[in-house]
Image: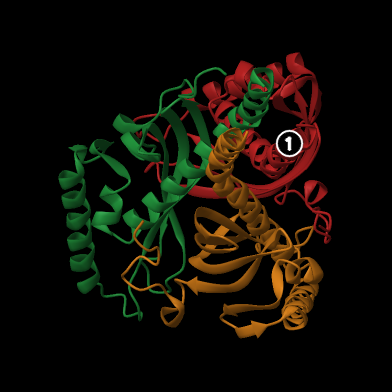
Chain colours: A orange, B red, C green
Amino acid sequence: MKKFVALALLLIAGPALADDYASDRAQIENLMARYIFALDWQDAEGYAATFTEDGVLHSGAGAQKGRAALMEMVQKLRAQDDKRNAEDKSGKEGKPRARHEVTNIVIDVKGNTARAWAYWSHYNNRNAERSATFDSFGHYEDELVKQNGKWLFKERRVFNERFPARAATDQSPVPKN
Amino acid sequence: MKKFVALALLLIAGPALADDYASDRAQIENLMARYIFALDWQDAEGYAATFTEDGVLHSGAGAQKGRAALMEMVQKLRAQDDKRNAEDKSGKEGKPRARHEVTNIVIDVKGNTARAWAYWSHYNNRNAERSATFDSFGHYEDELVKQNGKWLFKERRVFNERFPARAATDQSPVPKN
Amino acid sequence: MKKFVALALLLIAGPALADDYASDRAQIENLMARYIFALDWQDAEGYAATFTEDGVLHSGAGAQKGRAALMEMVQKLRAQDDKRNAEDKSGKEGKPRARHEVTNIVIDVKGNTARAWAYWSHYNNRNAERSATFDSFGHYEDELVKQNGKWLFKERRVFNERFPARAATDQSPVPKN
């Protein structure tokens, strides 16, 4: 019986281990997508909820630490955009919008922590025709933690190729496999 | 023995439950990618096959319900493009092409149904140099069902930021977690 | 006892089979993202490591077969870019960069081999403002193998819509489901 238990555990653990990465990756990809919807629609609460309580964003605006600071940052972005849109003289119906795309997501998982790297690009339709204009790009470097079965950002660093001080170096940020 | 069976089932069910989301997400991501290849290459049959028999697409062309209507829509797109390409005076070899990119895929699964939200952007090379020109963007809101173990679109709604009547609202379409 | 073993194996195999696709897809997506980081940062070793020992890349530069040839190709790309950047007269601080985005990843797995199809698009900031300029797009057609539990490219074919000789045909490369 003991042998059988050991065998059964081995059989169960085999696929479970193999599938852990898929399971973690699926949740982290979903988190990254939720992050962007919240950012682009300036949903301050939804945005802050993708971070741990003490999560930190490092971006052009400096470091924002903790959910309260993260919410405030997004609320300010919304206020700025509302003001800019109110002053919009393009004469075209509807509001101009700006959006981020995230691709090339590399994720390394180690137990309840993970590191991730991904590309972002950004476009807007702030013009009379509301046609798409590509404007900037860069990459993210992330540290994530799994808390109560849920993956969250602990730290997200935003690199931006438009600004030399915030651009990537010559060496790929992704470590060797 | 009964205790062991219960324990074994628990052990098996644990990882299985944890992996269900990964499994569903993997299949839905693949479906979304197949949808785009079929749309951009105007493969009417392949496109319709990503929907349920009574699936509906809500787009700028109105609502297309059922696989026959969906196939007809894609066949018309192909005819339009063939005509436009035949009239192309750019003088450059090869045919102009247009493509969609899908990113930021949020998927919520509930048993055999799922809701999804994703970004799309669109570009073409309809110019003398066949260089890439970004033209429009928006998002999808989807309802999916799993039929005979296979995920399919039940309803897909296309939002397009080029047209105010089809643009997103100020509130993120993704519900709170 | 034998009956129970059979039942347990069935229960274990059920979810394991269902999750195999998710597991393989997660690893292949990660490989595809690692490929792009290595390509865009011109990390020759990291790039070659995404292929099997005898892996082949078919691109505008012809066929590169084997890790040594793949490394050499990337080293040459780096030398070309270093030279071009050294001669850059834009007067803007920082180096111009170019990046690829991969989306719409279709993956069909059959045991330890897989076929995949995906979109790529490309942009750069080789201008005085370091603003993003979209430049080209196409798709990949891949054959992959799982060696020692690790997915690798066996062959990757790059199609590019900028050059008629390397463009896609009118028929979607993705086979019927």
User: In which quadrant of the rendered view does residue C54 lie?
Assistant: top left
Q: Position of residue C165 (x, y in %)?
A: 29, 30
Read off the chain for label 1.
B
Q: Is residue C101 left or right of residue B12?
A: left
Can residue A171 be seen from the camera position used here? yes
Q: Residue furthest front?
A: A1
Q: Is residue C83 left or right of residue B90?
A: left
User: In which quadrant of the rendered view does residue C52 lie?
Assistant: top left
| Element under disc 1 | helix
User: In which quadrant of the rendered view does residue A154 lie?
Assistant: bottom right
Which three-letter amino acid code belongs to the residue tagged 1?
Phe
Q: Position of residue A112 (x, y in %)?
A: 60, 62
**Residue that label 1 marks:** B4
Q: Residue furthest top?
A: B68
Q: Nearer the viewer, residue B139 or C153?
A: C153
Q: Position of residue B173 (x, y in %)?
A: 81, 53
Q: Position of residue B135 (x, y in %)?
A: 58, 48
Quadrant of the frame with the N terminus of chain B: top right
Q: Is residue C102 left or right of residue A12?
A: left
Q: Is C42 drawn above or below residue A7 in the view shown?
A: below
Q: Residue furthest bottom?
A: A62
Q: Is B130 drawn above or below residue A63 in the view shown?
A: above
Q: Nearer the viewer, residue C89 or A67?
A: A67
Please give the name of the residue rendered at 65% of the width and 26% of the height, measured from the top-left corner: C14
Please give the name of the residue rendered at 44% of the width and 71% of the height, measured from the top-left corner: A161
Please give the name of the residue rendered at 46% of the width and 41% of the height, measured from the top-left corner: C28
Quadrant of the frame with the C terminus of chain B: bottom right
